[in-house]
Image: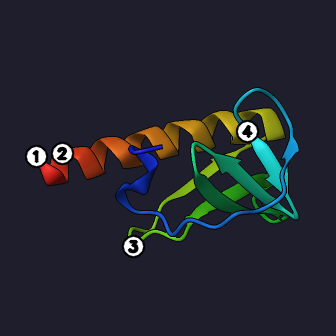
Amino acid sequence: TARAKCCLKHQEILLSKIDEQIFLLDGMFIYNGFAASVRYSEEDKLYVGRIEGIKSVVFFEGESLIQLEEAFKEAVEDHLDFCNRKKG
């Protein structure tokens, strides 16, 4: 989408659908054209993600995969808002 072109390097990849908006590919979440790496922190008992392929460093976390998915969506939307404000 035009919104996602703000900061992302685009690639074509094969995706497995998790729900209507989130995709998972080899330990990566995909949402609205953005990809995030995901890992589990045994020490913190949290799933931790980082949006990849952008200049900014954006992390998000959740105690469950459902919480992590919601945090990822929120992080992407916040990043897009930031990019739009920066342009304006």
In the shown orientation, is residue 39 left or right of residue 79?
A: right
Give how far apart the Cα atoms at labels 3 and 2 are.
16 Å
Q: Amino acid at mark 1?
A: Gly
Residue at which label 1 appears? 88
Please tell me whether residue 83 is drawn above or below residue 42 in the rendered image.
above
Q: Amino acid at mark 3?
A: Lys
Q: Position of residue 11 (x, y in %)?
A: 64, 67
Give how far apart the Cα atoms at labels 1 and 3 are.
18 Å
In this view, which residue lies farthest toward the top? 20
Q: Amino acid at mark 4?
A: Ile
Residue at which label 4 appears? 22
- Choose the circle earlier in sequence order: 1 or 3: 3
Specify few, some or many for label 3: CA neighbours under 10 Å numbering under 14, 14-19, or 20 or more.
few
Residue at which label 2 appears? 85
SS label for mark 1:
loop
Specify few, some or many for label 1: CA neighbours under 10 Å numbering under 14, 14-19, or 20 or more.
few
Specify few, some or many for label 2: CA neighbours under 10 Å numbering under 14, 14-19, or 20 or more.
few
Give how far apart the Cα atoms at labels 2 and 1 are.
5 Å
Look at discs 1 and 3 and give the one toward the viewer: 1
| Residue at 72% over, 34% down | 67
What label sits on residue 55 in the rendered view? Answer: 3
Q: Position of residue 75 (x, y in %)?
A: 50, 45
In this view, which residue lies farthest toward the left? 88
Q: Position of residue 14 (x, y in %)?
A: 84, 57
